[in-house]
Image: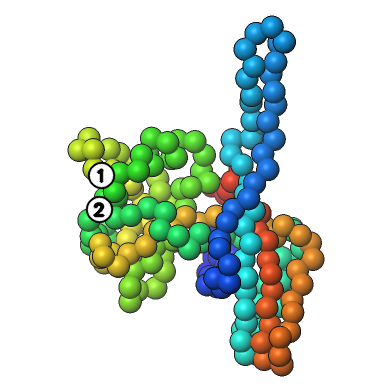
């Protein structure tokens, strides 16, 4: 699958251990020695690193893993990677073709949407339906203290039931290292331990 001109890595991650992001962010300390000390970040958002375990069973899956490695050219070629988390939650079901979704209020439109484009791309998973990818183009708040609205492009491609829909952010990433080691556990099983670096300030428009 291609989204905004780049591949989407649609392989489910193995849950061998906990999923945890780590990040080092540069801060400039502004200190006049006699006045108030402040800090300033040179970039709009930190670039976290997330580990990802990819186990391939069978020749076709191993070929897919090796093809992914060769296509990356080390850290050169970026790609999209779903968070595999429920980052936003529906407050009501949505019909097929719906241009907007009603979410449970998390102040996304107030705190996240205006900051950068790093969290404006989403993957929607609905039981029995193929995954679909969308861009959040606008937000609104009805003022009920419980919900908020997002407009998506393209519109919902299928019915999105409240009880069985997951919305995950799409992260724009690259490999953290140029070398990607693939271990062959048997003749038909291979595994790669991959570290992904998010590129929140380089998300394509």
Query: For the point 39% across and 73% down, which residue is it?
Result: 130
Residue 6 appears in the picture as rendered: no
- Circle 1 SS class: strand
Which image quadrant for residue 86?
bottom left
Residue picked out by circle 1 = 147
Numbered-mark total: 2
Which image quadrant for residue 195?
bottom right
Seen as rendered, the residue at the extreme right is 179
Judge by depth and name the residue closer to the eye, 171 or 89: 89
Residue 181 drawn at (x, y percent): 77, 72
Which image quadrant for residue 149?
top left
Query: For the point 62% across and 66% down, which residue is it?
Result: 52
Query: For the point 33% across and 73% down, which residue is it?
Result: 127
Q: Check whether the beta carbons of the residues at disc 2 and disc 1 lie within 8 A of each other.
A: yes
Seen as rendered, the residue at the extreme bottom is 187
Question: Seen in the image, is 140 located left or right of residue 130?
Answer: left
- Circle 2 SS class: loop
Q: Which mark is residue 91?
A: 2
Residue 194 drawn at (x, y percent): 68, 66
In the figure, 200 relative to 167: above or below?
above
Residue 185 drawn at (x, y percent): 71, 86
Query: For the point 69% across and 6% down, which residue is it?
Result: 34
Residue 98 drawn at (x, y percent): 26, 57
């Amino acid at each position: 699958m291609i989204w905004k001109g780049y591949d989407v890595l649609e392989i489910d991650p193995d849950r061998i251990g906990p999923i945890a992001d780590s990040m080092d962010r540069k801060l400039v300390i502004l200190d006049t020695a006699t006045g108030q000390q402040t800090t300033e970040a040179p970039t709009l958002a930190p670039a976290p690193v997330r580990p990802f375990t990819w186990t391939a069973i069978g020749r076709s899956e191993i070929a897919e893993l090796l093809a992914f490695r060769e296509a990356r050219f080390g850290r050169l070629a970026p790609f999209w990677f779903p968070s595999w988390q429920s980052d936003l939650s529906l407050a009501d079901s949505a019909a097929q073709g719906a241009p907007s979704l009603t979410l449970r209020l998390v102040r996304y439109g107030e705190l996240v949407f205006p900051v950068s484009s790093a969290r404006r791309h989403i993957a929607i998973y609905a039981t029995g339906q193929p995954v679909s990818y969308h861009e959040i183009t606008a937000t609104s708040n009805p003022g009920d203290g419980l919900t908020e609205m997002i407009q998506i492009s393209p519109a919902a491609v299928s019915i999105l039931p409240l009880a069985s829909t997951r919305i995950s952010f799409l992260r724009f990433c690259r490999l953290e290292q140029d070398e990607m080691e693939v271990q062959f556990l048997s003749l038909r099983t291979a595994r790669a331990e991959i570290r992904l670096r998010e590129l929140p300030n380089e998300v394509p428009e």
